[in-house]
């Protein structure tokens, strides 16, 4: 019972500390205004700006995680190259040390006052005051957490037996490094480990020789946060996760070789708490200097290790974390819709040309479920996007994309439903060929493929020339379909004729929907990697 209350204080303080860090990230996302959105391209234009963006974002939000999540979103939206996202990550690793610097100032006794100021000034109608108050309130939560941790550790360190146990463990630098590494991985926060380390240092329970190993362990252990976040995430998240892992692991191990030298230099100048804090800064800077000449190599290695293949039905670009940045979310949705349209084109080609299924039977059988799953994910994401009322341009773009997504969803149901069932059998083809010759089916199928491909590419690319082609092709298809239906109606009526007439009408209706898509020029560029994944090539019909 003697230790119960201190443990409660420490546990509650640690939770409050982590809550403050989390609230900082959430507040930043929710408070971003139009000015930030409009200048986002400028923030990440070039290596230096990408690096500075990572530093500032992680320093403001007291977390490097939000900077890396933004970098992933920017890469998927086409606003940033993957190599540029590595510069954001490098900047975030340095900016993330800012919270440790604030903690070293030992201003925790003022935490209640800071929270009160943040709370009351948050009622201001002035946006700058409101944002400042929100950030102060989040910082106050972090300080309040540290205050509780300090109140919990104070009585424990008055116990001589407890102090001896802690000192025995802390006296071994390697052990402290391992504990910091594991702690950063479990808590998914290197800042929390640094906070506990600063508390130990201020309680005279952390030997100077263990300060740098503790900071180093927290630095390397923080790689688990990004790697774990990327395991079930999108392609860019996985690649940045593996890049961060190699970046911090190799950089940390190299710094470990210089730890004794750095400690001897810092020992006579810095207190233990300051050696811990500034040691973390030196580690981050050392890591940057070591990898700066090799960022392109790290980018290439990550791309090669994490291939673009995966579950076709899983969204590749949609990111719930980017919903707080509507213009990014809309671009990600647009790119995912372009990917969906490519799958639909590939599947219709395979249905109409059985020879294209050769060697890709597994892909052919998986496409219907993948198309349905991906279209449903895109539709659900559309419902989640909230565009601010004052942004008329973005509202217009999103309205167009929402309408287009509804059409794509309807097309996916028709393609993977009745159209698939009729095209998987040879009954309709045999009916046309027996009545009008082999050329009748071939001409109709070829024009249908051509119409589908041109319409979906016009939707994705938005070229007026392609849109003009769709008008010509639709007129030709309507004329041919009408003539076939009339000729079939004059033939002896049987089950095959009925099903063929139904197929022609279904295809005409389906391609009519693709024509509507072709007139929507809001689509995003077609991802090349999707074409590589499906392996479906053009058949030379495109004009």
Image (cartoon, helix red, strand yellow):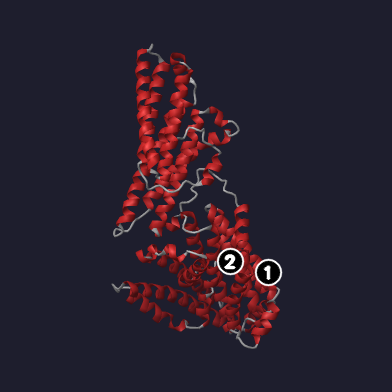
User: As displayed, is residue 248 above or below residue 397?
Assistant: below
Q: Residue at x 41, y 67 (%)?
A: 28
Give the camera-side residue of 304 and 472.
472
At mark 2, the secondary structure is loop
Residue under numbered circle 2: 222
Q: Is residue 511 left or right of residue 98?
A: left
State whether residue 348 appears in this view.
Answer: yes
Q: Residue at x 38, y 75 (%)?
A: 132
Residue 502 place in picture, x, y as percent: 38, 23
Give the camera-side residue of 390 and 416.
390
Residue 486 place in picture, x, y as percent: 34, 18
Residue 78 place in picture, x, y as percent: 47, 55
Residue under numbered circle 1: 253
Mark 1 surroundings: few (<14), some (14-19) or many (≥20) residues within 10 A: some
Residue at the far top: name it.
492
Numbered label tally: 2
């Amino acid at each position: 019972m003697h230790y119960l209350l201190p443990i409660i204080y420490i546990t509650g303080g640690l939770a409050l500390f982590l809550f403050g860090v989390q609230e900082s990230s959430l507040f930043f996302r929710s408070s971003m205004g139009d000015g930030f959105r409009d200048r986002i391209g400028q923030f990440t234009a070039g290596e230096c700006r990408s690096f500075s963006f990572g530093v500032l974002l992680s320093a403001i939000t007291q977390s490097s995680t939000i900077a890396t999540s933004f970098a992933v979103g920017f890469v998927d939206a086409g606003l940033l190259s993957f190599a540029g996202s590595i510069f954001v990550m490098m900047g975030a690793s340095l900016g993330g040390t800012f919270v440790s610097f604030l903690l070293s100032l030992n201003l925790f006794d003022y935490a209640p006052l800071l929270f009160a100021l943040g709370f009351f000034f948050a009622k201001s109608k002035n946006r700058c005051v409101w944002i400042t108050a929100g950030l102060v309130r989040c910082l106050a939560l972090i300080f309040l957490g540290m205050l509780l941790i300090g109140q919990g550790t104070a009585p424990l360190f008055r116990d001589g037996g407890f102090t001896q146990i802690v000192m025995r463990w802390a006296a071994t630098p390697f052990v402290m490094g391992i504990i910091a590494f594991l702690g950063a991985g479990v808590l998914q926060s290197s800042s929390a480990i640094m906070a506990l380390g600063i508390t130990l240092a201020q309680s005279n329970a952390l030997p100077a020789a263990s300060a740098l190993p503790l900071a180093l362990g927290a630095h390397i252990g923080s790689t688990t946060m990004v790697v774990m976040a990327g395991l079930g995430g999108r392609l860019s998240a996985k690649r940045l996760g593996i890049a961060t892992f190699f970046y911090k692991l190799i950089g940390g191990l190299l710094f470990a070789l210089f730890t004794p030298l750095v400690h001897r230099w810092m020992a006579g100048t810095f207190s233990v708490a300051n050696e811990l804090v500034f040691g973390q800064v030196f580690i981050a800077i050392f890591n940057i200097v070591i990898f700066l000449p090799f960022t392109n190599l790290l980018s290439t290695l990550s791309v090669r290790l994490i291939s673009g293949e995966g579950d076709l039905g899983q969204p590749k670009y949609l990111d719930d974390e980017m919903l707080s940045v509507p213009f990014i979310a809309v671009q990600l949705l647009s790119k995912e819709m372009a990917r969906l349209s490519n799958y639909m084109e590939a599947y219709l080609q395979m249905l109409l040309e059985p020879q294209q299924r050769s060697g890709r039977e597994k892909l052919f059988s998986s496409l219907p479920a993948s198309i349905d799953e991906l279209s449903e994910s895109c539709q659900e994401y559309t419902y989640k996007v909230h565009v601010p009322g004052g942004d008329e341009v973005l509202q217009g773009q999103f309205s167009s994309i929402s309408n287009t997504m509804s059409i794509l969803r309807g097309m996916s149901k028709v393609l993977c439903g009745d159209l698939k069932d009729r095209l998987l059998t040879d009954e309709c083809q045999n009916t046309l060929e027996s009545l009008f010759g082999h050329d009748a089916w071939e001409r109709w199928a070829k024009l249908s493929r051509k119409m589908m491909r041109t319409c979906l590419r016009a939707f994705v690319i938005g070229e007026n020339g392609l849109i003009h082609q769709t008008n010509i092709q639709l007129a030709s298809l309507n004329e041919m379909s009408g003539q076939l239906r009339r000729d079939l109606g004059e033939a002896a009526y049987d089950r095959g004729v009925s099903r063929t007439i139904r197929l022609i009408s279904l295809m005409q209706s389906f391609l009519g929907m693709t024509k509507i898509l072709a007139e929507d020029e809001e689509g995003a560029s077609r991802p090349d990697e999707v074409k590589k994944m499906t392996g479906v090539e053009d058949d030379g019909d495109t004009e």
